[in-house]
């Protein structure tokens, strides 16, 4: 009964919005109703794409994009189309591109957004790659929707999203570049030699990042959390947010935040590292001993370094061998 009530409220809201759009665009109400009914009519489509090319790009809007691998020879793309949401794809000897084609902003596009609310399954793009997908470059560019990669392997992957989150789970990608505006980045059990993550207005959560040689992370207005990970070099930080490192180890760490605490629990002994912890407004604590606003140990010439800095917040560091 609750679901029926919610669905009914959505339909009422859609009706009111459609009527308002009609007045604004000079379209009569019967026409608006006809357009809304069209948006709820979908056609299932699938494409089989050659997996031997070198470059693949996917540009989408208003979709939930799911990417995975399975034991197959080609790339399977599954999606739905309607009167206003179409897909265009091109290929040549070296590359393949797949793109959402959406009508220009109008009553039709308004209906398309509410069609997503009413029938979300039809706004789901599923891409299945072969299990052995090595030596390829893949890019995803999306707006107003989420992207999830799971059980996926590739040499180089670029993922960019505006107004939506990006999730990578159980993937192995040698070179990874992730960029989000107004959304979160989540990595769970990821193998990556070189990873660059950036968000504006969103947090970054990293769990079980392994065999990573270099990690660069930058976020504005969001927390940064890294747990159960081993990284050679990690640099970056956040502007307005807290940094949390838990069961974490790296050869070189250089992280900073402007407005937020830094709390770190390192695996193993770090007394032989160059250590530098500093805050302007807050306190510094290392292994439960307070050091006012700054703590420094050993020579900066050492190969192993941990540098943690904040302006407005505290720096609290523990090592598990303490």
Image (cartoon, rainbow, N blue to C red):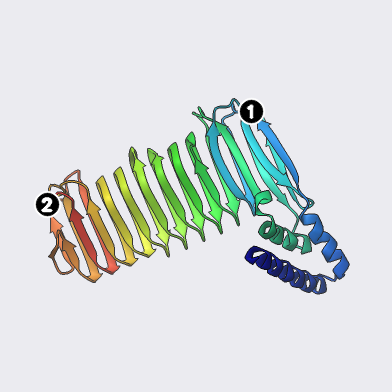
Does residue 135 lie above or below 144 as drawn? Answer: above
Residue under the image location 60 percent in, 57 percent down: 144
At horizontal 85% and vertical 70% (from top left) the residue drawn is 29
- Considering depth in this image, is 207 or 163 the residue closer to the camera? 207
Badge number at residue 225: none
Q: Secondary structure at mark 1?
A: loop
Residue 237 picture location, percent across and down: 35, 57
Asked if one can make out residue 308 in the rendered structure from this viewpoint, the answer is yes
In the rendered view, would you say 266 is above or below 175? below
How dense is the environment of label 1, judged by Cα within 10 Å: few (below 14), some, or many (20 and up)? few
**Position of residue 74 in the picture relative to residue 289 (left or right):** right
Residue 59, image x, y percentages: 62, 46
- Give the image quarter of residue 33: bottom right
Q: Residue furthest front?
A: 1
Q: CA distance from mark 2 to mark 1?
A: 56 Å
* Secondary structure found at label 2: loop
Nearer to the camera, 83 or 12: 12
Q: In the image, 177: left or right of 96? A: left
- At 48% from the left and 49% from the top, the residue drawn is 167
Give x and y (percent) for residue 155.
47, 33
Q: Residue at x 42, y 47 (%)?
A: 187
In contact (CB < 8 Å): disc 2 and disc 1? no
Q: In the visual, does 13 lie left or right of 249?
A: right
Q: Quadrant of the N terminus?
A: bottom right
Q: Which residue is mark 2?
A: 298
Q: Nearer the viewer, mark 2 or mark 1?
A: 1
Does 208 sit left or right of 81 as displayed? Answer: left
Q: Position of residue 315 (x, y in %)?
A: 23, 63
Mark 2 crowd level (few <14, some 14–19, many ≥20, 10 Å Cα): few
Q: Which residue is mark 1?
A: 50
């Amino acid at each position: 009964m609750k679901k029926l009530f919610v669905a009914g409220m959505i339909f009422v809201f859609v009706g009111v919005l459609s009527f308002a759009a009609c007045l604004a665009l000079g379209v009569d109400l019967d026409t608006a109703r006809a357009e809304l009914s069209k948006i709820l009519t979908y056609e299932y489509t699938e494409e089989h794409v050659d997996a031997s090319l070198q470059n693949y790009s996917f540009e989408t809007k208003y979709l939930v994009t799911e990417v995975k691998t399975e034991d197959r020879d080609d790339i399977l793309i599954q999606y739905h189309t309607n009167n206003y949401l179409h897909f265009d794809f091109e290929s040549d000897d070296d590359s393949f591109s797949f793109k959402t084609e959406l009508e220009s902003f109008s009553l039709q596009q308004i209906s398309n957004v509410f069609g997503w609310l009413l029938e979300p399954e039809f706004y789901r793009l599923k891409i299945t790659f072969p299990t052995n997908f090595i030596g390829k470059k893949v890019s995803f560019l999306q707006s107003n929707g989420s992207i999830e990669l799971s059980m996926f392997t590739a040499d180089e992957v670029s993922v960019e999203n505006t107004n939506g989150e990006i999730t990578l789970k159980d993937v192995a990608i040698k070179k990874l570049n992730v960029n989000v505006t107004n959304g979160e980045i989540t990595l769970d059990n990821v193998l990556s030699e070189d990873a660059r993550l950036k968000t504006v207005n969103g947090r970054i959560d990293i769990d079980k990042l392994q065999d990573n040689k270099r990690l660069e992370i930058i976020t504005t207005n969001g927390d940064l959390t890294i747990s159960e990970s081993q990284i050679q070099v990690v640099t970056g930080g956040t502007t307005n947010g807290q940094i949390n490192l838990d069961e974490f180890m790296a050869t070189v760490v250089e992280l900073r935040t402007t407005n937020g605490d830094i709390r770190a629990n390192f695996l193993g002994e770090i007394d032989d590292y160059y250590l530098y912890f500093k805050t302007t407004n807050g306190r510094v604590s290392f292994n439960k001993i307070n050091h006012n606003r700054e703590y420094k140990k050993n020579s900066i010439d050492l190969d192993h370094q941990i540098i943690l800095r904040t302006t407005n917040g505290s720096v609290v560091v523990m090592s598990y061998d303490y």
